[in-house]
Image (cartoon, rainbow, N blue to C red):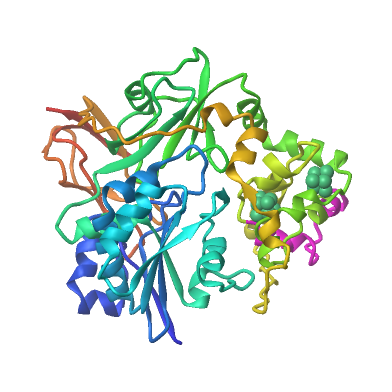
Amino acid sequence: MSLSFVHEGVRSENNPLDAVDPRIEKIKNAGVVGAGGAGFSFPCEVSEQGGILIGNGAECEPLLSVDKETMTLFAPEVVKGMKIVIELSGAKKGFIGVKKKNYKAVEALEKAAAGAGNIEVSLLENVYPAGDEQALVYDILGRTVPEGGIPLHVGVIVNNVGTLVNISRALEGTPVTHRMLTVAGDVREPATLNLPIGTSFREAIMLAGGSNSRNFKILVGGPMMGCVESDLDKPVLKTTSGIVILDVDHPFMARKSQSVSARIRIGKSACDQCMYCTDLCPRYLLGHYCYPHLIMRAVPYGLSYTNIVTTAFMCCECGLCTYFSCPLRLSPGELMAQVKREMIRKGVKNPHARTDVKPPEFRAGRLIPVERLMERLELAPYYTDAPFRENGYKPQKVTIPLKQHLGAPSIPVVKAGDKVKAGQLIGEIPEGKLGARIHASVSGFVREAGDSVVIEAG
Ligand code: SF4
Ligand code: SF4
């Protein structure tokens, strides 16, 4: 199989598909980026044979319901997006990965996919991190991604279901102006909302009934991989899948708020090498050379980039070892992430590239049910439904950053005083660079056009 890889949603030079399929241009023009959270510009690939597309609806982060609600409400658009990407990429078949507990989504998808022929719904267990691309590829197809590789290396494209909906809409001429996100945690009415990009977190929390706590912070992106934020005026982006509100004294928020350097310092001196962090690591359980306990032992003796230290390249930063596995509440995941960044900064190459990786036989018995994870993090009271609530909310003001994606920031194509309509282009990809277009999410007047475009509704 030969594969070539292009980025859509980006302006790319010498890309053969640009010239041959006008749908690519429509997707780019609509400003579609990966909606799963990382902000990758929408990937597409061409495979001669045997290529598979996976629609990722596994929703890794506990407490978030965005993928579930997206699949339930917009199943026909998910399936349409699958068909488009299958056609554009040359994939032969598509699978939509969805947790079986989300039975309404399963039902809607099965109905929408009936008769499509080459699209199947694939049921997943409610374990963490089910939505990790590499775990998903193994759980659905039984293929293991090589060390240091990506799903493309085993002929698989993975797109989040929200991205697929945006692709489907892009072909109807609708740009990305809104974002589905879950507002969960210590709020009166947990909900999944569809908000104009640039709406503040403060307004999103207000739409979920407000917080029960007077002194809270938020986790942007979910509890496990999300980051702590206390500025409620920050805006909802194309990649904001959810915000989780917790009192500052909640044990989990207190832990997330600790400085990484302090956590690593304590961890290095206290680790007793029990190995639980490695035993439950999802990448180790795929057969990769990922051994967080060895990093905990090696790093205090200095970074010499041995085969042990470079195993940090295998880590997907899921946080399971830090927040679930370690009985001493140390932070091996943070150490792995820090070492990885340090190696990238110093230009150290990943030496691990085994292709014959095989999950151990005990893998299935070591996967962590989300319910157990929630108990451990003392988040079980918040592990409730966050149903979609149609609100038609129109903020008075939106702040739309021109950098919400990987690649170069967009260049403003409007100026202060301009009148804009919802859906109008306000940020263009710089010539010859990778990036994504940005559109106005509300109609009104531009008040600022710098790193962000601020629009007052009117
Ligand atoms: S689980 Fe914790 S104590 Fe055990 S080896 Fe890992 S970091 Fe060390
Ligand atoms: S964060 Fe920990 S559990 Fe997750 S992949 Fe990295 S080492 Fe493994």
Identified at 77% across, 60% down, the residue is 309
Could you tell me residue 231's position as x and y percent? 45, 25
Quadrant housing the C terminus: top left
> Which percent across, then down, holds residue 204?
35, 27
- Residue furthest top in the image: 214
Residue at 19% in and 63% down: 26
Is 301 colored magenta in this rendering? Answer: yes
Q: Position of residue 235 (x, y in %)?
A: 36, 33
Residue 75, by quadrant, is bottom left
Residue at position x 64%, y 45% from top? 319
Q: Is residue 37 visible?
A: yes
Q: Is residue 279 magenta?
A: no
Q: Is residue 64 left or right of residue 134?
A: left
Query: In the shown orientation, is residue 130 left or right of residue 2?
Result: right
Region in magenta: 297-315
Residue at position x 18%, y 61% in the image: 171
